[in-house]
Image (cartoon, rainbow, N blue to C red):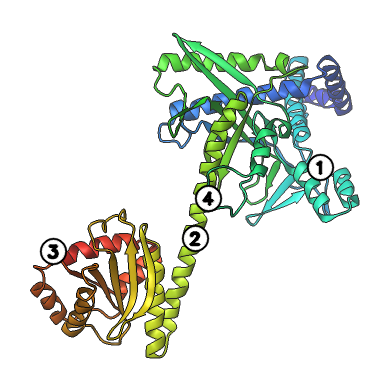
Amino acid sequence: MRKDADKSNERNWIPEKYFHGFQDALDSYEKAHPHWRIEVLVSLVKWGIRNLKHSIEQKPASKITWRNPLVELHYPLEWDWKSPRDGDNVYGKYILGKLTKENTSDPQKAAKTFATMMTCRFNTMALEHFTNGAWFEKRNNQCVPYLPANLDSAIKEIQGKWKKREALTQIYKPFWIGTTRIDVPDGGPKKITSISRRAAKRLESVGQRMDIPGISFTAQVNGKKIWSGLVFEIQPLIIDYDDRRAYHPVTIGLAFEHRLAGNDVLALTPSDWPANDRETFWDNILRGVDELTERLIPKNETQSSIILLHNGEILKIQPLHCRKDMKVAKRLFAGFQTKLQREEAFAKQCKRRLHLLRACDMAKTANEKGRALEKLAEELFNTVPGLKVVQSRARTRTEEIDLVISHDGNAHGFKDEAEFILVECKKWSGKCGKDEFVLFEKKIRNRKGRSSLGFLISWNGFTDTFSKEMLRGSHERLLVVPLTGDQIRSAAQRGTFLSLLESAKRDAVFV
């Protein structure tokens, strides 16, 4: 009997009728829900908010905090990894579910299967719609962009490299709610008192760059009122063949109100609230998200916010309520530019130091060696705040001084020194001893009281007689500080020259 029943079930299971039924269900749902993409969007926002709450409240060691309430999630999709290819054309792609005899054996199971597949289908199609159907394939740690056939053909017809690049930028850009990203231009003045006109225009036009302008929530908990703005971003699909994962990166966050307090910018967050009040805050946010569908159809709010990013690190999130808040945003933006310029300047300094260090190692003649070390020393001393090399190879009637350095009276560790600091560079095959100490000390002494400190750099170190001579003159204010080639090399490679000067000077005082 059982075998006969199984055979009967096999005969009665007709896949075609289920396929048609599934398509009819999809058509009926789309007619009843013309704004189904917005409904999917709202459900994704709620999913993201719950994950954001978990990251902040349940993971104390996480980088996601009230100071930086932003998390990137991966919305997974099922992908047919064996789908055939014809050049750049891929067939098959998504797997939205499977109809089997088991999951359609009775009406209840079939309805549950249809519901799961419909959810997957609408979510997948909505994500594809929000990101223009573009995707990236990752193989061997390299990402290659792809476009749907219709968009690819349209791009090829565009005349002009820059117009084509702008069109591609628009296609591959993320889908934004209440946020956008602003590129910080390279270069610019060393000291920033205001941001560029171009950057200011970008700040003022952030609302036009968003797909949906900002959505804000106002919560009042136990007399505490707080404003927060939604930060939401969907990026194009990533098909990772290395790890066999297909997903949309989704960024979700909250932007809190910022206020100027003197020269500081303070964010008003619930970080110091009791746990019960924070729970109420999250409940209010989720209730606010439930109302998004009505707010997005057909109108929305006009508030906006910006995210400043550098190397993937979130630096600031700033809501913009009105033009007055532009001052706060500009202050943040200018500070961000300053930080980038400091990093760029530091990178250039490192590159120059390493180049000069290699020149020291490659020098052949005595003159080349001495000159190479002087240039390296000049570069290093100029990196110390408050110090400046004002003369190199200064000649008098009786002496030659390799480097003359001035300080502005505020240089850390040099405030109490006389006006000029002298530097002597010796890139010899041997070590410096007593005679070099005496001669260099005399050069400092001959500066009519305008110099009280000197640094003697001996590439191959110092003899015992040098240390004994330092002890003999330890009762005087005049100070000679020895530096070896190994110390200079390490400081040049690590960018720790100021620390070296401070420790070497301290050691020389207490010799």
Q: Is residue 237 left or right of residue 374?
A: right
Q: Quadrant of residue 373?
A: bottom left
Residue that mark 1 sits on: 92
Viewer-nearest residue: 43 or 479: 479
Work out which quarter of the rendered image holds the C terminus and state it: bottom left
- Above or below residue 176? Residue 482 is below
Viewer-proximal residue among 11 and 284: 284
Question: Is tag 3's residue or tag 4's residue first in the polypeptide sequence?
Answer: 4
Quarter of the image where one finds residue 233: top right
Q: Earlier in the sequence, mark 3 or mark 1?
A: 1
**Amino acid type indicated by mark 2:** Ala
Mark 4, secondary structure of its residue: helix
Categorize mark 4 by other alpha carbons within 10 Å: few (<14), some (14-19), many (20+).
Answer: some
CA gap between label 3 and label 2 equals 35 Å
Under mark 3, the amino acid is Phe
Distance, label 2 to label 4, CA atoms, is: 11 Å
Image disc number at residue 510: 3
Q: Is residue 129 left or right of residue 279?
A: right
Real-space CA distance between mark 3 and mark 4, rounded to the nearest whole angstrom: 40 Å
- In this figure, which residue is indicated by the disc labeled 4? 340
Task: Give the mark, 3 or 2, whose residue is nearer the N terminus.
Answer: 2
Residue 410: image location, x then y, percent: 31, 53
Q: Are marks 3 and 1 in contact (CB under 8 Å)?
A: no
* Mark nearer the viewer, 1 or 4: 4
**Helix, strand or loop under label 3:** loop
Question: Which is nearer the N-term, disc 2 or disc 1?
Answer: 1
Q: Which label belongs to residue 347?
A: 2
The quadrant in which the N terminus is found is: top right
Please determine whether, in this image, residue 314 is positioned above or below residue 6.
Answer: below
What is the spatial separation of the Cα atoms under label 1 and label 4, in whole angstroms? 45 Å
* Image disc number at residue 342: none
Direction right: furthest residue = 157
